[in-house]
Image (cartoon, rainbow, N blue to C red):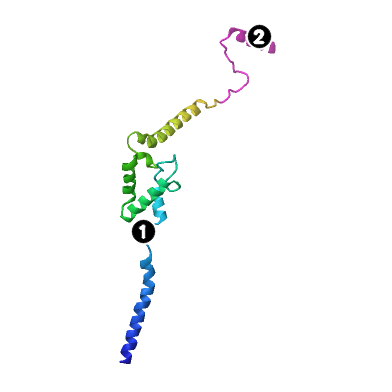
Amino acid sequence: MRKLQTVMGMTLGFILLSQVFALPAFAQDGGPTDDDVNVIARELYCPVCENIPLDVCPTQACEQWRATIREKLVLGWSDDQIKDYFVDQYGPRVLAEPPAEGFNALVYILPPVLFAIGAFILFMVMRAWKVEPPTPKGKGVTVESEDPYIAQLEQELRRRDE
């Protein structure tokens, strides 16, 4: 009988001890952290302030938006679903990065196209500025001029040198 009490006491002690270590795991909140909220908030802009991301804006409206993001994350919504929710409510102006569709597609298409055009123009200008090798100086090289006065001057200078 004494042996049974010892075994039961040890078993009960083991169960209680395992519960002590398991309680902190259950006590941890499985909800989204501030970092989880800020990952999404960084991609949205404040509806009240101009050009301030939602994750750093101190206004009351932004605090409410961050709380809404936290609620949606608790409900299991994905990042895209949350962003779509805010776009449906306030329009695409709340997005930090405009969608690549319609007129907004120019934001993504124009810079590389303009860079390519600029590189081509630079290449053509550099080719046009190509330095021609100097002509060798010395006897036997005559330069014909279209101006009759310059031609006469050169002819007189040659006669003088002879």
Query: Which residue bears the numbered disc 2?
Result: 156
Q: Which residue is mark 1?
A: 31
Crowd tier of the residue under label 2, counting other residues whose Cα lies within 10 Å: few below 14, some 14–19, many 20 or above: few
**Range of residues picked out in magenta:** 133-162
Secondary structure of residue under mark 1: loop
Q: Position of residue 55 (x, y in %)?
A: 43, 48
Instruction: Say if 150 sits above or below 41 in the image.
Output: above
Mark 2 or mark 1: name the one nearer the start of the chain: 1
Quadrant of the snapshot with the N terminus: bottom left
Specify the farthest residue to the front: 60
Q: Is residue 135 left or right of residue 21?
A: right
Q: Residues within 10 Å of mark 1 (few under 14, many from 20)?
A: few
The quadrant where residue 7 appears: bottom left
Q: Find the residue positioned furthest to the bottom.
A: 1
Q: Is residue 134 magenta?
A: yes
The label on residue 23 is none
Residues marked 2 and 1 touching at CB (< 8 Å): no
Q: Where residue 73 sits in the image (x, y, percent)?
A: 34, 54
Query: Where does the image place residue 22, in percent across and percent down from the top left?
Result: 36, 71
* Residue 42 visible in image: no
